[in-house]
Image (cartoon, rainbow, N blue to C red):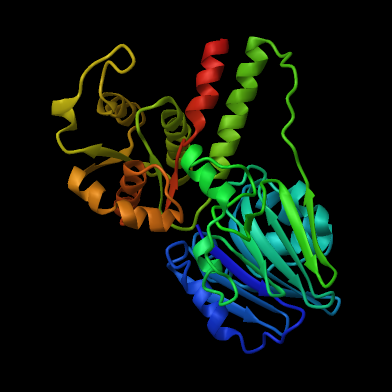
Amino acid sequence: MCGIVGIVNYEEDLSNGHTIIGNMTKALTRRGPDEEGTFVKKHCNLGHRRLSIIDIENGKQPMSCKINDITYTIVYNGQLYNAQELRKTLISNGFDFKGHSDTEVLLKSYIFYGKEVCKQLNGIFAFAIWNDKTEELFLARDHFGIKPLYYSIADHNLIFASEVKAIFEHPKSKPILDKTGISELFGIGPSHTPGISPFKGVQELEPAHFMIYHKNGLQKHEYWKLETKEHTDDLETTSEKIKFLLQDSIERQLVSDVPLCCLLSGGLDSSIITAYASKYYQKKYGQKLSTFSVDYVDNDKNFVKSDFQPNTDNYYIDLMVKAFDTDHHRIVLDTPELYKSLEEAMIARDFPGMADVDSSYLLFFREVKKQAKVALSGECSDEIFGRISMVF
């Protein structure tokens, strides 16, 4: 997880804007604790906080590339799962590479494909690219909005960031509550209508959209839409397709130059991921896969069996650890810890969310981080595989 920020203003000279862009960038330190970088030009300032995962040395940001007397500069949060395929295509079209970071692949993919670049990407991303010749900013967000990206226009400034708190580090942006956004926060939170935030004048770039900002204003475009189609495959064909998609998506996310692990709750989603990931890890690296689970003090004493949950999570976790020989770590949290971390978790999230669930995540990942920097999770997969099991 990284963090990006930026300012574009065609009416003022931003060449001396180091302090403002620096404050905005520092506001995202949690997202990128490893490195900080800024890019300051007359009409555009960019900032980046980095969590170093791939190509530690050559993946520094902001990253610039000069081609045909045009300099393109990117700040990027995310991961491309088809970076190697894109790299091969770019090399065959005359591009060369200094390193193996997906940031460099993304920047040169934009130079090659232009505004159609998002249609070529398989991954999760939020990024901005500045063209110094046209003085145009291109911003984009991934298909399902996994990576956040907010923006505001205030007194001729386009201000954008991975988190709203960074936008409010700009002196022209004020935290004024929006009636619709607050209503949604209390009514359906933590869900919300794509594009809406709780603050007036602050918008979210919708999933599967890109945005171009230039001297004539702002243009927004949708580059992809999920379509519902009739399912015509038989059971065998469906099973083979699901197997392929699972293996492909999991293995593509196991690319990392730093320690990696899986979160294992014993549920269907995390167990599937652990099964594939552990086999891949042992075959490729000859190592056990590290897995982590969270538990709570006295949970075993207070557990009550039901038809819905006849056993504790630990029962199923132990079955998976034994079956796939993982190096498992059980993190135990206590209720007072969760309570004391509620506010810190909300600040990290930017908005009120799921109360003790968020503080649990915060404390859990803080412990995981001591041993691994990347974690694969089956978050939100229960709904998909629950529906599939019902159909079959």
Vertical arrangement, residue 169 with respect to residue 283, above or below: below
Q: Can I make out residue 60 in this image?
A: no
Residue drawn at x 56%, y 60% is 162
Name the foreground residue: 381 vs 63.
381
Q: Residue at x 42, y 36 (%)?
A: 278
The answer to whether 371 is drawn above or below residue 188 in the figure is below
Residue 42 x/y as whole percent: 72, 85
Is residue 115 among what the camera can see? yes
- Residue that sits furthest to the bottom in the current view: 16
Taking the image as shown, residue 345 lies to the left or right of residue 192, namely left
229 left or right of 369 in image = right
Apparent side of residue 64 relative to residue 35 in the rendered image (left or right):
right
Residue at 48%, 58% (x, y): give it.
Answer: 257
Instruction: Tell me the quarter of the image containing the C terminus.
Output: top right
Q: Residue 251, located in which quarter of the rendered image?
A: top right
Residue 71 place in picture, x, y as percent: 77, 76
Q: Quadrant of residue 13?
A: bottom right
Image spot of residue 214 (x, y percent): 81, 69
Front one among 108 and 338: 338
Residue 133 screen position, x and y as percent: 83, 77
